[in-house]
Amino acid sequence: MFKNMFKPLFKSKKFIIGLSIVLFFILLGIFGPMIYRVDPTEMTWDMEQAPSSTHPLGTDTYGRDILAQLLYGIRSSLYVGFLAALISLVIGTIVGTFSAVRRGITDDLLMSFTNIVLTTPSILIAILIASYLDVRSIEMIAVILGLFQWPWFARAIRAQLMSVLSREYVYLSKMAGYGDFRLIVEDLIPTIATYAFMSFVLFINGGIMGEASLSLIGLGPTEGISLGTILQWSVMMDAIRRGLWWWFVPPGIAIVAVTASLLIISTAMDEVFNPILREE
């Protein structure tokens, strides 16, 4: 079913381009550190060196290899994005589906909670939570970001499922004695699969950008290296003013390339699956 569902996407040039870029960075993050075996935290006397044969992307103020940092940073940022997206997708799906199915007081309570989270400035809450944590792992940053991305998704799938619940095959399933959980899994979830995947892509984008934002203000991961922390270190050492372009340009390009390609994928999916935008 899913194979036939996503098959039209591979006829879209936008989707192919976006997916190719994302896969490139995923492979770079996974296999890059295995191929380029340089410790990104090792300090040397080659401080603030421009790109050379010894250090292909130069070094920072402490003599650490920028290419090694970039490869580990890509892996960490993508990991944060995927984990935050998974958390948001699960919460949004549970809240949206049960709100649509149960109706009544359950719907009122879940949607009231959703509206509260939706109207709360999520980035400010994330900043407050992160500021109170002395140690912030990659996973902790992903959890903080994932807990505040889901409300719009929950409201959207609730609206979609409210119309699906009025269809004949859903009534037949209820007459057959399907419980809420079985009804959700077998009849409702498949109808929102494409929208959920498109939302998952946007959640990844939000997770990557959120981590970079927190890192730039000094509230990113205290353990490990991400693209955001590389940018933070370059800002702290005034690399932009001093012209150390090899320090801040590569992570900046990586963030822009990944997030832009994810948006291209999302746009391509919308054009393929949305009847209004679908090309004749």
Image: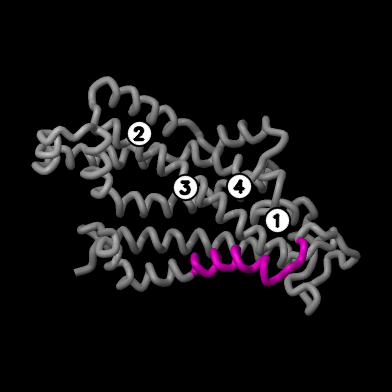
Q: Is residue 13 left or right of residue 4?
A: right
Label 4 to label 1: alpha-carbon separation: 12 Å
Task: Give residue 276's position: percent from left, percent from top.
Answer: 21, 58
Q: Which residues are magenta?
A: 21-39
Task: Give residue 63's position: percent from left, percent from top.
Answer: 84, 63
Which one is in front in this view, the residue at disc 4 or the one at disc 1? 1
Which residue lies under the disc numbered 3? 85
In the image, residue 49 lies in the stretch drawn in magenta = no
Q: Earlier in the sequence, mark 4 or mark 1?
A: 4
Residue at the extreme top:
105
Which one is in front in this view, the residue at disc 3 or the one at disc 4? 3
Which residue lies under the disc numbered 4? 213
Q: Residue 230 has which mark?
A: 1
Which one is in front in this view, the residue at disc 2 or the one at disc 1? 2
Badge 2 marks a residue whose secondary structure is helix
Label 3 to label 4: alpha-carbon separation: 16 Å
Q: Is residue 150 left or right of residue 32?
A: left
Label 2 to label 1: alpha-carbon separation: 36 Å
Label 4 to label 2: alpha-carbon separation: 27 Å
Residue at position x 44%, y 31% in the image: 117
Type of amino acid at the residue the image marks with label 3: Ala
In front of the other: 216 or 109: 109
Which residue lies under the disc numbered 2? 95
Residue at the extreme right:
45
Type of amino acid at the residue the image marks with label 2: Val
Q: Earlier in the sequence, mark 1 or mark 3?
A: 3
Residue 127 placement: quadrant: top right
Dot 2 crowding, Cα within 10 Å, few <14, some 14–19, many 20+: many
